[in-house]
Image: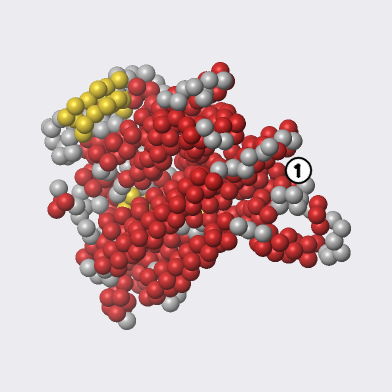
Amino acid sequence: MLEQIDLSTVNWARAQFALTAMYHWLFVPLTLGLTFLCAFFETIYVKTGKEEWKELTKFWMKLFGINFAIGVATGIILEFEFGTNWANYSWMVGDIFGAPLAIEGIVAFFLEATFFAVMFFGWNRVSKGFHLLSTWMVAIGSNLSALWILVANGWMQFPTGMAFNPDTARFEMQNFFDVVLSPYAISKFTHATTSGFALSSFFVIAISSYYLARRRHVKMAKRSIAVASVFGLIASLMVAFTGDEAAFIDGKHQPMKLAAMEGLWDGQKNAPVVAFGIVNGMKEPGDFQDPFVVEFKIPGLLSLLANRQAGSFVPGINDLVFGNKDYNITGVTDMIKKGKRAVKYLAEYKAAKKAGDLTKASNALALFNQYKDFLGYGHLDSPKEAVPPVSITFYSFHIMAAVGTGMIIIFLLYLFFTAKGTIERNTWLYPIGILFFVLAYIAGEAGWVVAEVGRQPWAIQGLLPVKVARTDIAPVNVKLTFFMFLITFTLLLIAEVKIMLKQIQIGPKEVK
Amino acid sequence: MQSNIGSNKGLPGRIVEFYVQGMKSMGLGKTLWKIIAIKLFIIFFVFKLFFFPDMLDRFFHSDAEKAEHVSQLLVSPGLPTQGINQQQILQQRR
């Protein structure tokens, strides 16, 4: 098994990016959601004037502060990796990413940095109203920061609002609003932030459940659960809704990813969702092997998810690789031919321009423009390259979807027993609440695996494969920094967990 | 700012005082700031300086050179995987 893994530089660079992004995502979702929970708690304090709510707010704010401090700047490493491991990609997207990332920096600095200080230093030193405003601004600011990063990611999934400049070899922004309001940008932002809200709600529920189990800080724990279960339930329903939207736009713009998510090799009408399945990892495009060792299907559901039309046709991996004339699907095989033409005419354009033959250059450019949308396919050696790792995508998607469904049920149970006033008696629910905090993290990471592994081999969908995007540096350099990050981030994570656990052990200040 | 309303200092002075007093009164925050400082040092002075150079900046001196290099890769499918690295390309071009 291990000998089948290709340990070339590009895969080490991919692994390093995945490692740093996944570690970064341990800190980010908690920041996104806990800020809003702190804002809710503080709003209740300001409305009621009860000191218990103030101490409760300060406790959760302290845990938020720990997470924020340990997590801050872990994302900057991803930008370092762009310049070193993905230099060609960085050059090509610089014009697109410049604006969103600059806005992110400014928003993060002015909103978060300014109001963050008031939030932590301002108790009893600024008015209640101004302190509350600051807490809300930190919540909004941190989520707005995420927006710009996710806009950049959305553009990689669905490059829009740009034109390729063959003279500079860069994608240049033509319409800022097309980039910001692209369906992928909106989908990424809403799905990622709401999943962060749900995870943070489980964070509050898990710690509160621990207190209830230990009969400590009971009043505070019950109040925290009441707010977190409402917020979590709304968030988890939104996660489901935005997830459905994500699948729908994948069906339109990234059908290969959707097919891999469901292990659908041969397209069909009334396509099923596989509720549970064991994938045949040896299956390849065009062969006659069964795609699953075991599978339990829900007929017709994938057609509904992908097209919002019962009984409709959903293309499978084979249709997308080899084409399907019946449904007017152009296969990767044909796209590669068009891509090779794009590459050829781009080369002719560059050569003619260098030679000063403007007529020939103009003709070559006109031909290039006919095929430029297939530029990335010109770099694929075989149609199989356009198929993402099906097993990883399938399992990640199903883990995410299963946990997402479970989250709704658990939030409902916590809310039900809280409303009934019996949450203290239903101790069986506490370990499940704690478990779901861990599962929510796994689901969040799995979601990113689906989003990114499921669209391989592309750095920019259809336009730039990772093998061209990467820098040709020696694998040993990437390996070295991979393990350096692994050690550094693991130490940071241990530090966070230790400090968190100590503060949880101390607990909130009791009001007499 | 409630407690500073009676202060004779102007707004900038009151803001500085707000931060200074806040920093001084930190408990757990001091530990977190130490972690942040160590982390930022590792990230910017170790990782960035020694391990994460901007590769195009290192080998090419102008945007035109960088554009030419990336264009070359775009019109030569398979080039990056054939062991031709930036340094070799630069030497060839010279």
Q: Position of residue A33 (x, y in %)?
A: 54, 41
Q: Nearer the viewer, residue A242 or A171?
A: A242
Q: Nearer the viewer, residue B15 or A353?
A: B15
Give the residue type at disc 1.
Gly
Q: Chain of mark 1?
A: A
Residue drawn at (58%, 61%), measured in percent from left and top?
B30
Quadrant showing the C terminus of chain A: top right
For mark 1, what is the residue? Answer: A129
Find the residue positioned furthest to the bottom: B94
In this rendering, position of residue B85 left or right of residue B30: left
Q: Position of residue A229 (x, y in %)?
A: 53, 29
Residue A164 vs A199, above or below: the answer is below
Residue drawn at (52%, 28%), measured in percent from left and top?
A233
Using the rendered view, name the quadrant where residue B48 is placed: bottom left
Q: Nearer the viewer, residue A348 or A214?
A: A214
Q: Nearer the viewer, residue A365 or A293?
A: A293
Residue B66 vs B91, above or below: the answer is above
Q: Is residue A365 visible?
A: no
Q: Secondary structure at mark 1?
A: helix
Q: Position of residue B92 (x, y in %)?
A: 28, 78
Looking at the image, how many numbered discs can be counted on the residues? 1
Q: Position of residue A485 (x, y in %)?
A: 37, 61
Q: Is residue A40 visible?
A: yes
Using the rendered view, name the quadrant where residue A104 is placed: bottom right
